[in-house]
Image: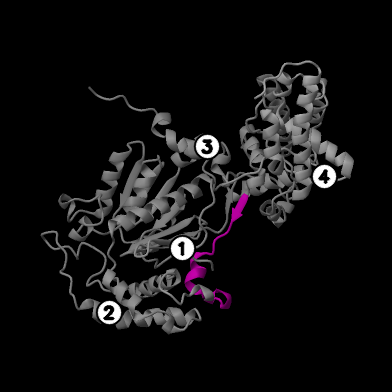
Amino acid sequence: MSSMTLSREQRYDRQLRLWGDRGQEKLGSANVCVLGANAVGSELLKNLVLPGIGGFTIVDDAVVTKKDLGSNFFTTSLSIGKPRAQVVTEYLSEMNTEVRGKFLVENLDNLIENDPSFFLGFDAIVYTNILERIVSQAHIPIIICVSVGFIGLLRVSVQEHAIIESHPDSTKPDFRLDSPPEAFVRLVNDPENDLDSLPATQLSQVPWLIIIYKYLSHFQRENGRFPTSYSDKQEVRKLINAAADSLLEKCRSRGETIEPNFELTNFQEASRAVNTAISETKIPPEVLQIFEDCRCQCYGSSDDRLTPDRSSKSTSSVVNLTMSSFWKMVGALKEYTMNEGGGNLPLRGDLPDMTSSSSRYLKLLGIYREAAETAVEHLASRLSHMDELRLEDVRLLAHNAAYLRVIRCRSLEEELKLSPARSDDLHLIPAHEENDAMLWYFMLRGAASFYSEHGRWPGSPCGASTPTVATAEGGDHQFAPHIVELDMPCLRGHVNRVLTASGVAVNRVSDDFVHEMCRFGGGEVHSIAAFMGGIAAQEVIKLITHQFVPICQPLIYNAITQRVALLEF
């Protein structure tokens, strides 16, 4: 009996909980180019194919050899001698038939020389080997993911990247108790929320946000200021705790029968929530920095008429966000903030759960949602000239206004040409073996220089597994044990040049690192390749969906010590 085909919602259920329908829509329309079908490239693509990437293209002129069988689980002994790009593409395509998989058996250098426009149609380009040449100058995100022996390197390069849904690890509630919606103030003062006259059964159903605001207002009348310090908030908390006991006593004095174990749970919730609920409304510094950008400030000028963005593949929604449209949207957001918002960003309009009757809670929630929707309408009117925007896109911008981010990563050209170790970075060069991430970074740079000169990894007797490398039986050249010792002096020279150019004494990297890199011989260990491929796939998804914040610094994974480190330079 054949099994029923799962719907897209069922197939992608778990990830939809992470990045939602919008993220899945963007992922499903994206096209990624992976340069190299080695182990790390195959594992990276596996983690893109399973969640439903729209399409991928592998560029690789290598053939499958016995060396691949030990590290690349998308090759078999029957694949030996066949183009590696074709073999990996076929196996990956079986994992998700909705994904469009393509391959190109061609040398990368020749492709760059003969058809540089080939790369312009991709949403991201992934290198899986030593970086020799930059393939694109079209502001397409580039991800380098390399696995060599027990060391992994991840590097993201994007000139400028906007994030609307950054999904911060923790968020503060947006109650605006220092300048609440007028409808909220009216609700607090409504007779149905007169705490002194309510019976105990109804008193226990008042949402704690109303309770906090009542005693916050009492504090303001007594002290003439909004509580900002910890001691001020403690005073508000004391008022709430004292009121709970006092109000129950009033209920008893009116002849109400109250059980001995009866508690005002909502007052307890209010007391616990004082620190987070009472806070001054401020624009986050990251958003202020965006507002101060000249491209945001020039919004609305006479020469800033919206023209169709030819680089955008679709004009249906923010799902296809471009930097041009982002700055126009943020410019409108800034104008709203400075005018209708009274210096504040749009209200988010969501509330946490509270002990309350359904009618009271829904009335309170409705007030905040209405205020948030009013802000959306004002913002939409300022963006009416952007015909490609839908109302739900404006709503998304307003809801995430406090979490907007713009990241800029150092370009790969800068990293390869400039010194990564400025004088204030030298403390990153460790004096002990446990913190050796920067040392391995220099080793990889030295190995890249070695590769550029010799066309092979240090310690490897041959270059990439091209058709000339595989024997008629599909085997590889035998490893020469002495090649490690022969390559060590040459690799040492390349590493020393990198260290000298970086302003670091050559003796900071011991020969043990040089020897270990030669012992790796450019080989991949599947577990390390799978780990790095998984991390890199996450970064690709972040860049494609414009959700979550990508890693902007080089990442080094040392499987020997089981440490992951970000290099801050």
Cα distance in 3D space between marks 3 and 4: 40 Å
What residue is shown with label 4? 226
| Location of the C terminus (image quadrant) | bottom right
**Residue at (75, 47) in percent of width and height:** 300
Label 1 residue SS? strand
Q: Element at badge 4?
A: loop
* Closer mark to the observer between disc 1 and disc 4: 4
Tag 4 or tag 1, which sits nearer the N-term? 4
Q: Determine if the magenta segment contains residue 59.
A: no
- Location of mark 1 (residue): 565
Give the Cα distance between marks 4 and 2.
Answer: 70 Å
For the N terminus, which image quadrant?
top left
The residue that appears at 66% across and 29% down in the rendered structure is 265
- Out of 172 and 225, give the one closest to the viewer: 225
Residue at image mark 2: 487
x%, y% of residue 261?
65, 25
Q: For residue 22, which numbered disc appears in the image?
A: 3
Q: Report the mark closest to the observer, 3 or 1.
A: 1
Horizontal and vertical percent position of residue 315: 57, 39
Label 4, residues with CA under 10 Å away: few <14, some 14-19, many ≥20: some
